[in-house]
Image: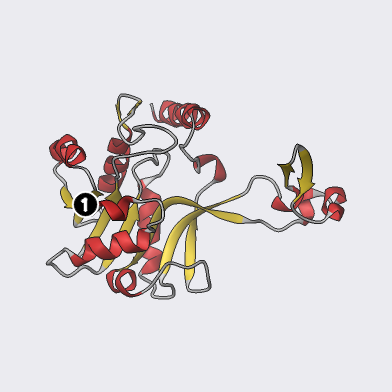
Amino acid sequence: MNIGIILAKESSDRLKNKNFKNFNGKPMIAWAIETAKKSKVFDKIIIATDSDKIIKKLKRYNLDFIKRPKELSEEKCGIDEVMKYCISTLYKKVDYACCLFPCAPLLSHTDIVKGLSKIKTNKYKYIFAASNYSHPIEKSFKIKNGKIKLNFSKRNSYISSKFFPKNYHDNGYFYWARANTWKNNFFKYDSKSSFIEIPNWRAQDLDTKDDWKKVDLIFKSLNRKKC
């Protein structure tokens, strides 16, 4: 049995109530649910939440629910602990489990399918979604005490961007692993993990109003092309 577990806690520190904020006519989380269903790879899609209110709101989507303890919704708690807890509550044997997030309207169902196909090769413990940085991180800087401070060597400022290798970041869309892997290991960025590349224009955080506007514009553009 393959399962998809969508993590949906009640609180949101930066963008309030973003899981249920209206996004193009639907609650934001509805897009994640629809994408998971459209992939057709899950025998069960489960909402793991700390809130009875969320369970009540999502009953109409014909899903399964796991009520997780409040301590598994704290910022210090990683997805490993949540996935381990959720899988341990299930009675049926789980083969592969995918951790999904509720605020990823630019995630495609084909990304999820590719993730399952890659984890099934048995070459890796984890498969996750990642994107490349649009500009070389070797040229990045920060502001410290009101002054520009380079993150890397000053020499990099004079090197053409084309000479730097691609760098990637985890975009937090999904994580695939065998059920036993979730139970016995912690996720690591190492040779035992690999990723499905998501174009960086389709990998957007949703933590601020500016993020929301940007994602909304991209989403509308994509859906106009489908019409």
For the point 77% across and 51% down, the residue is: 162
Q: Is residue 215 left or right of residue 96?
A: right
Q: Quadrant of residue 127?
A: bottom left
For the point 30% across and 44% down, the residue is: 9
> Where, quadrant-wise, is the C terminus in this rendering?
top left
- Judging by the rendered image, the residue that carries numbered circle 1 is 46
> Where, quadrant-wise, is the N terminus in this rendering?
bottom left
Numbered-mark total = 1
Helix, strand, or loop for circle 1?
strand
User: Viewer-proximal residue, 211 or 68?
Assistant: 68
Where is residue 22 shown, x and y percent of the image? 33, 26
Residue 103 shows up from this direction: yes
Where is residue 77 shown, x and y percent of the image? 37, 57
Mark 1: few/some/many CA within 10 Å (<14, 14-19, 20+): many
Q: Is residue 143 left or right of residue 35?
A: right
Q: Is residue 158 left or right of residue 51?
A: right
For the point 13% across and 67% down, the residue is: 92
Which amino acid is tagged 1?
Answer: Ile
